[in-house]
């Protein structure tokens, strides 16, 4: 259990780094959009490539922070069926749900890998007012999905071993 805890903390540090990168990118997009608005309004000269850069940054911002959100228990969950189960059955249901999440996102990561490799092999470019390769963005999507799958697997093992997650407290809406 101690080794698993260390692994979860080390992996968590990686996820915090990815979340920080995501946050910095979000801030940069905000600055770019504000600069674009000001340049358009004041000088009738928008910042070239704002649309392409912001639409390319959004997948990075979203996918790089998915696993961190899972680690912190921030994803929406429905406990309607499990909140009244005995603790052992509730734990089993949670483990099964996390294993299902692992399988789903591992499959999505695999599909993302294939998509990124195809994009890389054909040299896919963003076409617009500026041109740049978009395969790095597709690899970041793969990375985010793979990190999320790993986090689901770590959570499933942790809960199966008797550990508690940050989201173990039920918030019941009436």
Image (tube, rainbow, N blue to C red):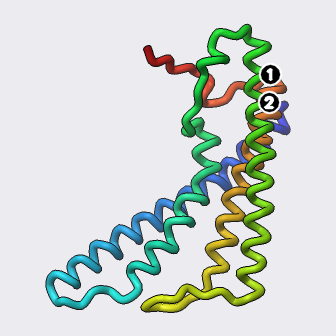
Q: Observer-nearest residue: 149 or 163?
A: 149
Tell me the crowding category of disc 2: few under 14, some 14 to 19, or many 20 or more residues within 10 angstroms, Cα based: some
Residue with the most extreme left position: 42
Q: Position of residue 34 (x, y in %)?
A: 27, 72
Seen in the picture, residue 55 relative to 171 is either above or below; the reply is below
Residue occupied by mark 1: 92
Q: Quadrant of the C terminus?
A: top left
Answer with left or right where residue 31 lies relative to residue 109.
left
Q: Position of residue 111 (x, y in %)?
A: 77, 63
Determine the image quadrant of residue 132.
Answer: bottom right
Q: Secondary structure at mark 2?
A: helix
Answer with left or right where residue 3 lies relative to residue 26.
right
The residue under the point 65% across, 65% down is: 141
Residue occupied by mark 2: 96
How far is disc 1 from disc 2 in space, using C-alphas? 6 Å
Determine the image quadrant of residue 137.
Answer: bottom right
Q: Observer-nearest residue: 173 or 171?
A: 173
Determine the image quadrant of residue 69.
Answer: top right
Q: Quadrant of the N terminus?
A: top right
Answer with left or right where residue 63 lies relative to residue 145.
left
Q: Secondary structure at mark 1?
A: helix
């Amino acid at each position: 259990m101690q080794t698993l805890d260390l692994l979860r903390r080390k992996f968590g540090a990686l996820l915090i780094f990815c979340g920080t990168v995501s946050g910095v990118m979000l801030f940069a997009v905000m600055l770019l959009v504000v600069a674009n608005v000001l340049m358009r309004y004041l000088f009738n000269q928008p910042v070239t490539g704002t649309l392409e850069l912001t639409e390319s940054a959004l997948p990075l911002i979203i996918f790089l922070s998915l696993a961190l959100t899972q680690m912190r228990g921030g994803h929406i969950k429905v406990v309607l069926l499990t909140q009244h189960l005995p603790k052992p059955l509730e734990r089993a249901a949670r483990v099964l749900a996390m294993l299902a999440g692992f399988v789903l996102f591992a499959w999505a990561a695999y599909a993302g890998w294939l998509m990124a490799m195809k994009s890389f092999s054909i040299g896919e470019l963003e076409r617009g007012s500026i041109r740049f390769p978009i395969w790095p963005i597709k690899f970041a999507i793969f990375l985010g999905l793979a990190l999320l799958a790993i986090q689901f697997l770590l959570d499933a093992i942790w809960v199966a071993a008797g550990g508690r997650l940050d989201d173990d407290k039920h918030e019941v809406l009436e």
